[in-house]
């Protein structure tokens, strides 16, 4: 069984010493090369990186990697080993191919543990941080193109927790199914969404929206999975993040 996990990155960074990991430069078609393989070979959408973020790497992986299992992580965020103490050095806590292979022997999908908002639903958290119309147009597209996913999409939006970060490892057949479904929706959203007045951050909309679609796909297709903790390679200021989260709830950023 061969597993390839691409590391979505835009700058040189530490890479685990494990052949399972493949650093890939996002937006290689529009940014200076940094020494890694780019997401602009074969079938790709590399030139749309400003709007699709790490999804240009996901698209490239789904169309150009032939491993049994394919995954995506971020240069500063990895899946953590269950065998290592949380007090072990960060680099030692990144899961390796042997342990991941044992997990994949009993499941077809590995995800990060759910993110909990507690005082926000997935819907309100999004519209307080971004533009409400992003989700309104997305829902309309789902209702029109694949209405069987609408109940799960609405249920996910009503929850206060979900799988985010666009991080996962999947059996190749499942990944191809997910990406076909996902990009069909996102490319339609790209055609229909008016981003006039959007900031550069808000223009990353397709990456943001995709994080809110994974659970709907999992639920609709009744796909089971295993969850793993995350290892953050850089310091996380949780106090600042918490303050920003509460601030957005009461003083939303969007202008819809």
Image (tube, rainbow, N blue to C red):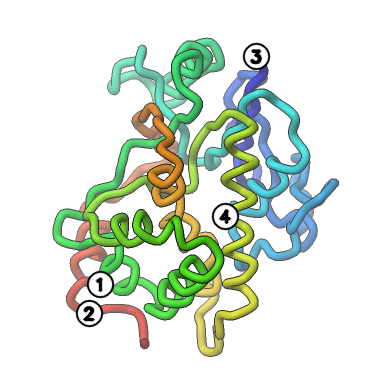
| First of labels 3, 2 by sequence position | 3
| First of labels 3, 4 by sequence position | 3
Q: Is residue 245 above or below residue 89?
A: below
Q: Which residue is mark 1?
A: 248
Q: Which mark is residue 182?
A: 4
Q: Nearer the viewer, residue 72 or 22?
A: 72
Q: Residue at x 64, y 77 (%)?
A: 191
Q: Which mark is residue 251?
A: 2
* C-alpha separation, residue under disc 2 versus residue under disc 4: 31 Å
Verify CB contact (< 8 Å) between mark 1 and mark 2.
yes
Verify CB contact (< 8 Å) between mark 1 and mark 3.
no
| First of labels 2, 4 by sequence position | 4
* Percent x, y of residue 224: 40, 31
Residue 225 figure quarter: top left
If the image is split into quadrants, where does the N terminus sit? top right
Compared across the picture, whether 222 is left or right of 188 comes to: left
């Amino acid at each position: 069984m061969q597993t390839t996990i691409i590391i979505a990155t835009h700058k040189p960074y530490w890479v685990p010493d494990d052949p399972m990991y493949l650093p890939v430069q996002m937006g290689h078609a529009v940014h200076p090369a940094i020494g890694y393989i780019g997401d602009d070979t074969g079938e790709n959408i590399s030139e749309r990186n400003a709007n699709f973020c790490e999804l240009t790497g996901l698209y490239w992986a789904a169309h150009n990697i032939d491993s049994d299992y394919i995954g995506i992580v971020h240069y500063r965020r990895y899946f953590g080993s269950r065998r290592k103490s949380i007090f072990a050095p960060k680099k030692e806590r990144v899961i390796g191919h042997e342990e991941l292979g044992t997990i994949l022997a009993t499941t077809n999908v590995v995800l990060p543990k759910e993110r909990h908002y507690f005082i926000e639903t997935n819907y309100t958290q999004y519209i307080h941080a971004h533009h409400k119309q992003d989700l309104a147009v997305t829902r309309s597209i789902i209702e029109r193109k694949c209405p069987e996913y609408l109940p799960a999409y609405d249920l996910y939006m009503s929850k206060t927790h979900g799988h985010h970060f666009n991080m996962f490892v999947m059996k190749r057949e499942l990944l191809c199914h997910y990406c076909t479904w996902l990009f069909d929706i996102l490319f339609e959203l790209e055609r229909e969404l008016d981003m006039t007045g959007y900031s550069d951050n808000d223009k990353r909309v397709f990456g943001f929206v995709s994080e809110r679609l994974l659970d709907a796909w999992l639920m609709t297709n009744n796909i089971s999975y295993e969850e793993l903790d995350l290892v953050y390679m850089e310091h996380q200021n949780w106090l600042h993040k918490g303050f920003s989260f509460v601030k957005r709830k009461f003083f939303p950023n969007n202008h819809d």
